């Protein structure tokens, strides 16, 4: 998983914990949502391409 994927995964898991606090999601539901989310992020991470560096902003000065 890429660094961006790892960052997204951590943010998503924190988001799930906030949802659990607000909506009183059960541990089983939380675990299932976490597994689904990590699977989606891992799948998306395998299809991302590196950033396009062909067009660099001109430096001012």
Image: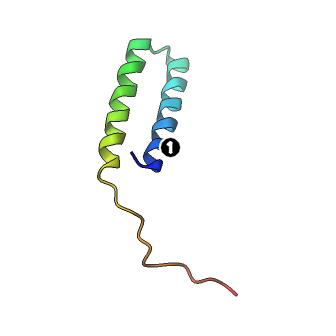
Residue 1: quarter of image: top left
Q: Quadrant of the C terminus?
A: bottom right
Residue 49 lies, in percent from the top left, at 34, 60
Nearer the observer, 18 or 7: 7
Task: Determine the image quadrant of residue 39.
Answer: top left
- Return the residue found at the far bottom: 61
Kindly identify which residue carries mark 1.
Answer: 7
Q: Residue at x 50, y 19 (%)?
A: 20
Crowd around label 1: few <14 · some 14–19 · many ≥20 (10 Å): few
The residue under the point 50% across, 36% down is 10
Residue 45 image position (x, y, % from top left): 35, 48
Residue drawn 66% across the image and 84% down it: 60
Q: How many marks?
A: 1
Question: At 29% across and 53% down in the image, what residue appears?
Answer: 47
Helix, strand or loop at label 1? It is helix
In which quadrant of the rendered view does residue 38 lie?
top left
Q: Please give left or right for residue 43 compared with residue 21 in the image.
A: left
């Amino acid at each position: 998983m890429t660094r961006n994927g790892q960052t997204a995964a951590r943010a998503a898991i924190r988001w799930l914990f906030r949802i659990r606090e607000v909506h009183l999601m059960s541990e089983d539901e939380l675990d299932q949502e976490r597994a689904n989310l990590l699977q989606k992020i891992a799948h998306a991470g395998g299809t991302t391409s590196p950033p396009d560096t062909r067009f660099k902003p001109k430096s001012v000065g």
